[in-house]
Image (cartoon, grey):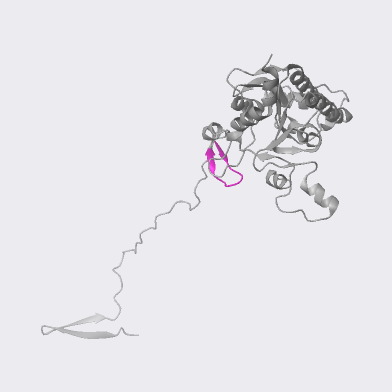
């Protein structure tokens, strides 16, 4: 088939052009290559451990040093993070005024408990982790000029569980406060009695309350401070019999957990059940005190509760 041609007149000259002009022979069409773009997935930047913490309430990332300077309280929403016993003591007592008692007392495996891990192995693990011998630190120190007996529990040591050593150390603290005529402050955080010691741990409930009865008979004040969480045998004994019962904001407080109670009663629990705010509204505790105000408020309460003691000691 012949190629169709058109006639083009230019200045009297006639030239024929094909309808489709093929590319010159021997040439190849070239196309610019599209540059490769980087992956759309951005590489997740690793945050070194021990520098930042995420607030479980408001999700704010908080620099650890800033959190420590604020007594482990979120600077944005006021969420109270767990705090160690020694950190709490340092925040409450005057510098170098704390005289620790029974610092080397340590638990023993009376029942020869064996399970997934032996009790002695558990004790050694947590002693190494927390630098404590057991779940409570006791001693005598000064809070804004008031000399007081102070016991502080640490949840990081086996969940703040109360075993023979915890009960014994607290009992000795209470007896020392009674003998020396001092007000008593116990700051509690615990999951309850220590299962590894069986009935021996349950006996501490009666022992501590018996010592508190003698302390109360001498009309010396006892301030109980409840922190998150305070449950079971601790709440069912000395933690709930203070002359004043204080709590940190948002603390979970009770005998059994909400899930156990709900399953047992087969009833819907009210909103905020077992929170410090709920218990304040229903009269179980006397006041909610933020951690940063605790030292000032304890000093204020001690001023009021020790007034009678000052008047008695005055004439002598």
Highlighted range, magenta: 52-62
Residue 164 % position (x, y) = 82, 25
Image-based side of 194 in relation to 36, left or right:
right
Q: Residue at x 76, y 20 (%)?
A: 178
User: Compared with residue 102, is residue 36 higher up or lower down, i.e. above or below?
Assistant: below
User: Can you tell which quarter of the image residue 138 is in?
Assistant: top right
Please tell me whether residue 55 belongs to the stretch shown in magenta.
yes
Image-based side of 210 in relation to 243, left or right:
right
One can see residue 114 in this view: no
Residue 266 % position (x, y) = 84, 55
User: Compared with residue 2, is residue 178 higher up or lower down, i.e. above or below?
Assistant: above
Labels in figure, total: 0
Q: Which of the two residues, 258 or 299, is positioned nearer the viewer here?
A: 299
Q: Quadrant of the N terminus?
A: bottom left
Q: Residue at x 71, y 42 (%)?
A: 252
User: Can you tell which quarter of the image residue 314 is in?
Assistant: top right
Residue 168 % position (x, y) = 80, 22
One can see residue 250 in this view: yes
Residue 131 % position (x, y) = 67, 23
User: Compared with residue 244, is residue 312 higher up or lower down, i.e. above or below?
Assistant: above
Q: Quadrant of the C terminus?
A: top right
């Amino acid at each position: 088939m012949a190629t169709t041609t058109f006639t083009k007149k230019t200045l009297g000259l006639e030239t024929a052009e094909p309808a489709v002009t093929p590319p010159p022979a021997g040439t190849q069409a070239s196309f610019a290559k599209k540059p490769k773009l980087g992956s759309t997935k951005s590489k997740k930047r690793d945050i070194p451990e021990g520098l930042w913490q995420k607030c479980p309430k408001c999700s704010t990332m908080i620099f650890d040093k800033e959190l420590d300077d604020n007594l482990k309280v979120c600077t944005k929403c006021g969420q109270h993070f767990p705090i160690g016993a020694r950190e709490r003591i340092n925040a409450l007592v005057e510098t170098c005024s704390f005289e620790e008692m029974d610092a080397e007392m340590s638990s023993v495996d009376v029942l020869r408990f064996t399970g997934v891990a032996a009790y002695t192995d558990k004790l050694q693990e947590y002693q190494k982790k927390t630098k404590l011998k057991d779940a409570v630190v006791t001693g005598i120190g000064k809070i804004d000029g008031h000399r007081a007996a102070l016991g502080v529990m640490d949840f990081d040591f086996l969940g703040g569980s109360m075993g023979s050593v915890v009960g014994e150390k607290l009992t000795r603290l209470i007896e020392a406060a009674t003998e020396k005529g001092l007000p008593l402050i116990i700051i509690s955080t615990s999951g309850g009695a220590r299962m590894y010691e069986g009935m021996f741990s349950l006996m501490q409930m009666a022992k501590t309350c018996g010592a508190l009865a003698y302390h109360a008979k001498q009309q010396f004040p006892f301030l109980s401070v409840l922190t998150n969480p305070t449950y079971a045998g601790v709440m069912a004994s000395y933690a709930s019999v203070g002359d004043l019962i204080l709590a940190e904001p948002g603390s979970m407080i009770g005998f059994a957990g909400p899930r156990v109670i709900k399953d047992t009663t087969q009833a819907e629990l009210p909103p905020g059940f077992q929170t410090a705010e709920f218990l304040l509204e229903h009269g179980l505790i006397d006041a909610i005190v933020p951690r940063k105000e605790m030292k000032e408020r304890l000093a204020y309460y001690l001023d009021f509760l020790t007034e009678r003691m000052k008047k008695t000691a005055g004439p002598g």
